[in-house]
Amino acid sequence: MSDNPWTDRIVGERMTVDQEFSARIEESQFSNQQWSLIMTATEFEIEHPDEPDRARIVADTDKLDGVIPELENVQAGMGAMAGGPGGPGGSDSSDGGIVDSIMGALGMGGDSGPSEAEQRKAAERLTQEYADELQSHLESKGRWESVRESVADGR
């Protein structure tokens, strides 16, 4: 469902939820840049729009597989901007050379970070938390019913 006119109707609410949700992103394993990438691959749908008691916003994360491999590249780019190899003291014996790169590619060596499967699960959880927060916000502003009805009516 790439054409979601209902999401076009709630742009202002999305911006508010984005601001409120930023604290949650800071607590997560993802940087703001990584979260932006995740959100570009996430679509929001309303399940059971014709059943008011069951209707809810869900995060469709089917396209995440295309961005998960890029999350590490985004993080690596940020690390390079933050001061390069060597860490805070600047003289770490592991200086990010070719051997370290090969070891990392083989899954051997130090801090390799979360696996792609772990990142995907974390991204799925976080995007659904966002969807829940968005629905809660729409409900608190009295917009949820009209949005749900517009989807149920196919508008």
Image: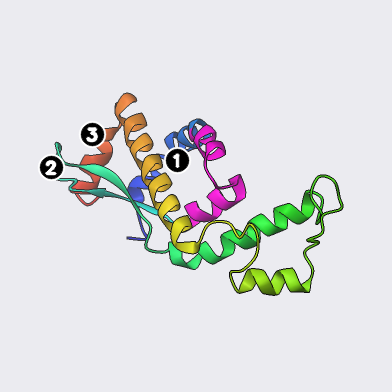
Which residue is drawn at the image coordinates 16% and 41% (left, top)?
54
**Mark 2 burial class by Cα count in 10 Å: few <14, some 14-19, many 20+:** few
* Rendering coords of residue 12 (x, y %): 46, 35
Do residues under tags 3 and 1 come within 8 Å of each other at their CB atoms? no
* Front one among 82 and 132: 82
Question: Which mark, by number, is residue 145?
Answer: 3
Q: What is the quadrant of the N terminus in the image?
A: bottom left
Residue 97 versus residue 121 in the image, above or below: below
Residue type (three-letter) at the residue carrying disc 3: Glu
Disc 3 from disc 1: Cα separation: 16 Å
Residue 105 higher or lower than 152, as above or below: below
Reading the image, the residue beneath label 2 is 51
> Which is nearer the eye, 66 or 40?
66
Q: Residue at x 42, y 45 (%)?
A: 126
Q: Secondary structure at mark 2?
A: loop
| 22 falls in the magenta region | yes
User: Of the residues shown, which amino acid type is indicated by label 1?
Assistant: Val
Q: Secondary structure at mark 3?
A: helix
Q: Is residue 4 above or below residue 98?
A: above
Per the image, the residue denoted by label 1 is: 11
User: What percent of the width, then of the height, locates residue 84?
Assistant: 81, 55
Q: Nearer the viewer, residue 119 or 136?
A: 119
Question: What is the distance, in whole Å, between disc 2 and disc 3 at their CAs?
Answer: 11 Å
**Dot 1 alpha-carbon crowd within 10 angstroms: few under 14, some 14 to 19, many 20 or more:** few
Disc 2 marks which amino acid? Answer: Glu
Q: Is residue 151 left or right of residue 112?
A: left
Query: On the rendered structure, is 9 left or right of 148?
Result: right
- Give the percent coordinates (x, y) of residue 8: 40, 46
